Amino acid sequence: MTRVLLVGLLAMAAGAGAGAQAQPQERGGPPNWRFVGAEAGRPGAVVKNAPFSADVTTETSMVLQDGNHIRQTSSLRLYRDSEGRTRREQSLNNVGGLANNTNLPPVVFINDPVAHVNYALSPSSRTATRSAGGGRGGRMRGAAPGGGQQNAKTESLGNKTLEGVAAAGTRTTITIPAGQMGNEQPLLTVVESWYSPDLQTVVLSKRSDPRTGETVTRYTNINRAEPAHSLFEIPADYKIADSAARGPKTGAK
């Protein structure tokens, strides 16, 4: 069961590109996390010469019509080296909508754009699932604020320092006109985004949407030092199996 689950989650990780990032999402655009909704990260985004490590926390909250509150929190530890490799350490709880009380073991996702390969590691079973990928080279570039929607307005929030890094803020308001999706009144989605040019990553985002509630994603404990290279390698005692896309070949590293 765990093996099948890891293979499925590896596909999510490969699509996310780990750019955390975790990363990286379009500047000024809405949050695009795949692990609660991947990775922290945009598909194919590879950022070089900007190493760091950080804790990434996503909190969602919603108030129902009867006044009941729904709150969920997910977190991961993110590493990125100077070559653009990323490592995410996280619990499987809340990945793909899994319940908080499933008590699933933690996993590690490694995205290696140098070797063009992704890994999903299960520390509890000392196994890893490998798939082709690893992203593309080049500087990450996001979509224009508002995702090209005609009813989007973006304003600057200036600059400030967050967790020791300089960040530029924007607020994007997206309006869904009355009647467009059966709504009697216009619907407003507001996204506040703080982008760090040095890290090429959004380090704080807040999204308020009347349909889904509020989502806040923040990077904390940011360390600009180069992570240890061993974090992006598979331990020698792990058993490695290729994903279905690569074939049934298995073997230890």
Image (cartoon, rainbow, N blue to C red):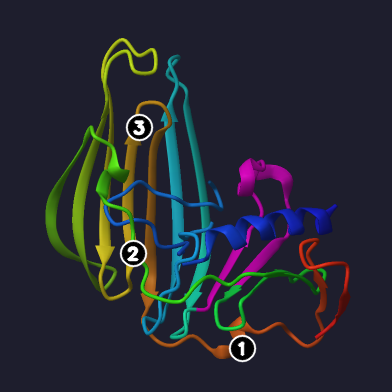
**What is the three-letter code of the residue carrying label 3?**
Asp
Helix, strand or loop at label 2? It is loop
Label 3 and label 2: CA atoms lie apart by 25 Å
At label 1, counting other C-alpha atoms closer than 10 Å, the crowd grade (few under 14, some 14-19, many 20 or more) is few
**What is the three-letter code of the residue carrying label 1?**
Ser
Which circle marks residue 230 in the picture?
1
Q: 206 or 27: nearer the eye?
A: 27
Q: Looking at the image, which residue is at 51% across and 66% down?
A: 18
Helix, strand or loop at label 3? It is strand
Provide residue 143's location: percent of width, then percent of height: 32, 54
Residue 146 image-quadrant placement? top left
Image position of 70 (left or right of 164): right
Query: Is residue 222 on the magenta stretch?
Result: no
Which circle marks residue 209 in the picture?
3
**What is the three-letter code of the residue carrying label 2?**
Arg
Provide residue 37's location: percent of width, then percent of height: 53, 46
Which stretch appears magenta?
85-110
Image position of 78 (left or right of 197): right
Residue 252 image-quadrant placement? bottom right
Q: Looking at the image, which residue is at 63% across and 68% down?
A: 109
Q: Earlier in the sequence, mark 3 or mark 2?
A: 2
Q: Earlier in the sequence, mark 2 or mark 1?
A: 2
At label 3, counting other C-alpha atoms closer than 10 Å, the crowd grade (few under 14, some 14-19, many 20 or more) is some
Residue where numbered disc 2 is placed? 141
Q: Earlier in the sequence, mark 1 or mark 3?
A: 3
Residue 239 image-quadrant placement? bottom right
Query: Is residue 89 on the magenta stretch?
Result: yes
Helix, strand or loop at label 1? It is helix
